Amino acid sequence: MTKRRFFRTLAVVSAATMLLGVTMLPADAKKKKKKKPKACPTYVTPDWAGEAETTIVTDKATAEAPIELTIPTEAGLGSSSEEPEGGSGAPSSVFQNFVIDTAGSGANVWARIDTNPAFDYDLWWRYPDGTSAASAAGFWVVPGGEGGETGVGYEQVNGVAALDCQGFTAEIVSATTPGGDVTMTVWLEK
C-alpha cells in the first residue's frame, strides 16, 4: 500500500467515524430532560389539629387568583388564645393545613377568612409546634393579634415569611358565632 492510498483510506475512515459518532448519539444525549422539581414532603398534621386536610400553595396562588376554600365552622362563644384550642368561654376551632411549595427558596404567605359581619371569628396561622406565626383576633374594627388585621367581616394574616416546603396549620376560631361556612383565601407574594 502506498503512502498516498494509506492517507486517503485514513481520511475516509476518520470522516466516517466522525459522521457515525454524531448521528448515533443516544437520544437522551441530544435532548436534555428537564428535571422535575422535588415534591415537598408530606405535612404531618400536629396532634392538636386532629384530622385537618392539607392544601398545597404554589406560586400560582396570587392576590389576583388566590386559593379559595369553603370551611364549615361550629358554634362558639368565647375568645381565642395563643394556645391551639385555648381561650376563655366556649369557642370552637377548625383546622386547615397548608404547605408552601414555591419555585424559589421562599415566599410570603397571606391568608384571609371572610365571614358574616355580625359574628366574631379569629384566625391563627400556626407553626407545627402550635406557636403563632401571625394572628388576626380582633372584633370588627378593634384590632387584636399580631401580624394580621381585623375588619368588618374578615380576619387576615399578612405576609408571613415561609420557606419552600414549610408547613403551617390555620386555626379558625368561632369566638362569637352560631357557626356556618367561612371563605378562606390563601396566596403568596415574593
Image (cartoon, rainbow, N blue to C red):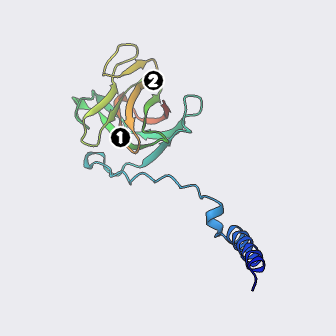
| Circle 1 residues within 10 Å: few <14, some 14–19, many ≥20 | many
User: What is the spatial separation of the Cα atoms under label 2 and label 1, in whole angstroms?
Assistant: 20 Å
The residue type indicated by label 2 comes to Tyr
| Circle 2 residues within 10 Å: few <14, some 14–19, many ≥20 | many
Circle 2: element type: strand
Which residue is painted at 29% across and 38% down in the image? 127
Question: For this view, does 130 lie left or right of residue 100?
Answer: left
Front residue (pair 122, 75): 122
Residue with the most extreme front position: 2
Front residue (pair 24, 160): 24
Mark number displayed over residue 154: 2
Residue 73 appears at what percent x and percent y? 41, 38
Mark number displayed over residue 168: 1
Residue 65 appears at what percent x and percent y? 59, 33
The residue type indicated by label 1 comes to Phe
Quadrant location, the N terminus: bottom right
Which residue is painted at 38% across and 54% down in the image? 42
Residue 146 appears at what percent x and percent y? 31, 22
Foreground disc of the pair 2, 1: 1
Which residue is painted at 45% across and 53% down in the image? 39
Front residue (pair 88, 146): 146
Asked whether residue 85 is in view, the answer is no
Question: For this view, does 33 lie left or right of residue 120?
Answer: right
